[in-house]
Image (tube, helix red, strand yellow):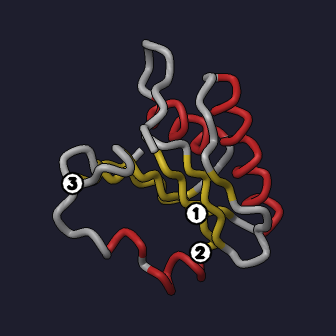
Amino acid sequence: MPKSKPPAGIPLPRKITDLLSERKADDILVLDFSRHSYFTDRVVIATALSTGHLASLQSEVTDLLDREHTRVISASRSAESGWTVVDAGEVVVHLFLKETRSFYRLEDLWGDVKRTRA
């Protein structure tokens, strides 16, 4: 499936990290997969403060993608697991509760990709 592309201007991952930061997400990290993967260019990982905050962040990210005319390919339906995912092709957003993120350590799976903090 081809990656979706946002309109020109501020890069979509930056818009997402700015939104997450404004909404008080913690430990925001961007992994650059543009040279390593055919399925996405960037993975954004962030930590929510509670299950309600997690659900709210996911909703806000989905709304942002809609405003940017970027198709959401897939999105988790429940924040109860402590981990939600929004897949928009060129960028995939993983939102965690702190303990769930510590358990899965998703960012440690790919040691050879460039990482940036938002």
Q: Sort mark 2 into few (<14), some (14-19) or many (20+) by Cα contacts within 10 Å.
A: some
Q: Amino acid at mark 1?
A: Thr
Where disc 3 sits, the SS reads loop
Report the residue at 78% width, 58% height from top: 55
Q: Is residue 27 above or below residue 69?
A: below
Q: Amino acid at mark 2?
A: Lys
Q: Give the Cα separation between the discs numbered 3 and 1.
A: 24 Å
The residue most toward the bottom is 103
User: In the depicted view, which residue is nearer to us: 94 or 6?
Assistant: 6
Q: Is residue 41 above or below residue 102?
A: above
Mark identifier at residue 27? none
Q: Give the Cα separation between the discs numbered 1 and 2.
A: 6 Å
Q: Sort mark 3 into few (<14), some (14-19) or many (20+) by Cα contacts within 10 Å.
A: few
Mark identifier at residue 36? 3
Mark identifier at residue 47? 1
Report the residue at 43% width, 37% height from top: 3
The residue most toward the right is 52
Disc 1 + disc 2, Cβ < 8 Å = yes
Residue 91: image location, x then y, percent: 46, 44
Residue 5: image location, x then y, percent: 46, 27
The residue under label 2 is: 98
Report the residue at 59% width, 82% height from top: 99
Q: Sort mark 1 into few (<14), some (14-19) or many (20+) by Cα contacts within 10 Å.
A: many
